[in-house]
């Protein structure tokens, strides 16, 4: 990899590049893209100029030079020495009004000088997936959708194929890439090809020309690649789903839609879903503490969307989301709400919502907003339609409205499946799973793992889909889990032929939604579709057959 130094003789210098949105390519427009705190700070210089004829605003100064380092008092307390030093970092930014931009080139702590709402989210990543060499990826950062906000960062210093990182195309959001830049015509490689590394997220870390004419030429090349090149085939999926930052201009519009939906009973795509951190406590919960738009919590024995809407609907639209974020829901094991089994989880993390803006599709899940591309949705829908169309190898009965608990349904179901055993609420505990997992609700005559769920909407089903993969993974990799499952089976049946030496070969999801006669892909929330597809891929990669059986009402 070429080292582009800061020597004045160098043709290019590694810089950090942002693309600006909602910014006019004029002096006034570029100044509005500066963070107000620094633009009006007497310690910073802001001047208008030009770069190769393009309108430009330059800003520079020192960040934090008047602030004493926060460890100085501790240093003196421990040593008696008065270390009077401060934290100081140089910061500079050049905002250039060119076609395809405007762009901001930053140095040092220069990113602080740009107003966050003016930064084009995902710009660097969008360029990277069109220009990087897919066989020389050095680092990938990804968020796992159906997890506890887990961020996974994998690094291979020498680089490798994107396939080597094991990225799941469904349910994982790539937020940063680093690798080798492919064939582009830029200042750093004029004359002869050179390998250079880039890193991309919202920004793009890349060598840029140090002469005015070269900088403008490089920005034009970056614009051309971003606007006209197709993503590298192995990386195209990255562009199809992304998390939105709170500063994204679409978020305020989406939250306005959500706030209005919170006061509506007109069938909005709105539902409660189980936060990932509460999944392990689901079967222990017999009541819930709900504190929303109130100074005190109330205890409810059944949690549904009305528990939220009833408390928010009387509020002004502008106050609903604040009340949701400052409120909480907490799971309790007793009926009176005295025995807590989960922490207080902010109420907005229990909410699922979907919305469209300007033909783009978004969903709110676990307190975050995600954008989903059309190609992603189309492929997801086609794949799941095929899964739902598969013939069922096991017949599950209709759901009688008189059955209030899933256990009642499961006990009736095993009467129609010769050799099956009901294991509902029979959790297994191992060293690897000390809180316990539910291997299945019903084990079939040929060791099929059958997971059953009747939900008030499709939103909570993502937990069911994740639960299925968790049980298979545990039973495949942990002999103790298989032995514990055999113990649970023999507690209910002395004739079932379960063999702990055999690993799972089939998993069945039986699903019902209370207000829908039948379940199909069409009445699943988008993130539930993503969770199902993620589970199916993981199971099939483990050589486990998957069936989805809609349970009619």
Image: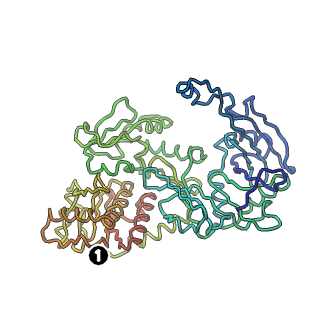
Q: Nearer the viewer, residue 365 or 219?
A: 219
Q: Quadrant of the C terminus?
A: bottom left
Residue extending furthest left? 494
Residue 226 in picture, x, y percent from top left:
70, 61
Q: Is residue 445 left or right of residue 63?
A: left
For the point 43% across and 53% down, the residue is 147
Other residues around mark 1 within 10 Å, as few (<14) / some (14–19) / many (≥20): few
Q: Nearer the viewer, residue 243 or 71?
A: 71
For the point 28% across and 67% down, the residue is 449
**Residue placed under numbered mark 1 in the picture:** 393
Query: Looking at the image, can residue 364 be seen?
Result: yes
Tell me where residue 235 sits by quadrant: bottom right
Q: Nearer the viewer, residue 422 or 155?
A: 155
Residue 379 in picture, x, y percent from top left:
51, 69
Tell me where residue 513 sits by quadrant: bottom left
Rendered position, 94 above or below 87:
below
For the point 70% across and 48% down, the residue is 20
Q: Quadrant of the N terminus?
A: bottom right
Residue 269 in picture, x, y percent from top left:
44, 52
Q: Is residue 311 left or right of residue 497?
A: right
Residue extending furthest right? 53
For the point 74% across and 41% down, the residue is 92
Residue 358 in picture, x, y percent from top left:
59, 54
Query: Looking at the image, can residue 272 be seen?
Result: no
Rendered position, 15 above or below 385:
above
């Amino acid at each position: 990899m070429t080292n582009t130094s800061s020597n004045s003789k160098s043709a290019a210098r590694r810089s950090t590049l942002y693309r600006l949105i909602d910014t006019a390519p004029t002096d006034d427009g570029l100044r509005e893209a500066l963070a107000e705190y620094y633009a009006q700070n007497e310690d910073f210089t802001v001047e208008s100029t030009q770069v190769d004829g393009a309108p430009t605003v330059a800003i520079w100064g020192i960040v934090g030079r008047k602030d004493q380092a926060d460890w100085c008092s501790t240093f003196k307390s421990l040593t008696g020495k008065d270390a009077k030093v401060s934290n100081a970092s140089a910061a500079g930014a050049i905002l250039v009004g060119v076609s395809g931009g405007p762009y901001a080139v930053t140095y040092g702590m220069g990113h602080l000088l740009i107003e966050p709402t003016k930064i084009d989210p995902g710009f660097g990543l969008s360029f990277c997936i069109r220009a990087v060499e897919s066989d020389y990826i050095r680092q990938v950062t990804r968020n796992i959708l159906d997890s506890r906000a887990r961020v996974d960062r994998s690094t291979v210093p020498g680089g490798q194929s994107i396939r080597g990182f094991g990225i799941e195309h469904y349910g994982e959001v790539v937020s940063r890439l680093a690798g080798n830049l492919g064939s582009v015509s830029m200042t750093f490689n004029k004359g002869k090809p050179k390998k250079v590394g880039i890193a991309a997220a919202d920004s793009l870390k890349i060598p840029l020309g140090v002469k005015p004419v070269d900088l403008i030429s490089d920005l034009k090349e970056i614009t051309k690649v971003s606007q006209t090149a197709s993503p590298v085939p192995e990386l195209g999926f990255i562009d199809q789903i992304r998390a939105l930052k709170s500063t994204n201009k679409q978020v305020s519009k989406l939250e306005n839609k959500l706030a209005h939906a919170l006061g509506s009973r007109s069938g909005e795509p709105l539902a409660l879903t189980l936060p990932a951190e509460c999944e392990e406590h689901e079967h222990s919960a017999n009541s819930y503490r709900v504190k929303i738009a109130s100074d005190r919590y109330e205890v409810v024995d059944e949690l549904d969307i009305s528990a939220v809407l009833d408390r928010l609907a009387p509020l002004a639209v502008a106050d609903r989301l604040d009340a949701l974020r400052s409120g909480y829901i907490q799971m309790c094991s007793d009926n009176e709400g005295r025995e807590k089994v989960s922490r207080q989880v902010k109420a907005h993390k229990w909410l699922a919502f979907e919305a469209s803006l300007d033909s783009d599709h978004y969903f709110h899940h676990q307190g975050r907003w995600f954008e989903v591309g059309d190609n992603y949705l189309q492929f997801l829908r086609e794949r799941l339609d095929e899964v739902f169309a598969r013939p069922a190898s096991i017949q599950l009965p209709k759901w009688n409205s008189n059955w209030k608990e899933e256990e009642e349904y499961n006990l009736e179901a095993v009467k129609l499946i010769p050799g099956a055993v009901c294991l509902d609420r029979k959790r297994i505990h191992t060293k690897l799973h000390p809180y316990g997992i539910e291997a299945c609700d019903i084990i079939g005559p040929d060791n099929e793992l059958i997971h059953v769920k009747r939900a008030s909407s499709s939103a909570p089903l993502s937990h069911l889909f994740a639960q299925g993969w968790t049980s298979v993974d545990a039973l495949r990799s942990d002999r103790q889990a298989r032995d514990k499952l055999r113990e649970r089976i023999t507690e209910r049946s002395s004739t079932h032929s379960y063999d702990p030496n055999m690993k799972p070969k089939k998993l069945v999801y039986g699903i019902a939604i209370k207000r829908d006669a039948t379940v199909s892909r069409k009445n699943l929330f988008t993130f539930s579709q993503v969770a199902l597809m993620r589970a199916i891929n993981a199971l099939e990669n483990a050589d486990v057959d998957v069936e989805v059986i809609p349970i009619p009402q």
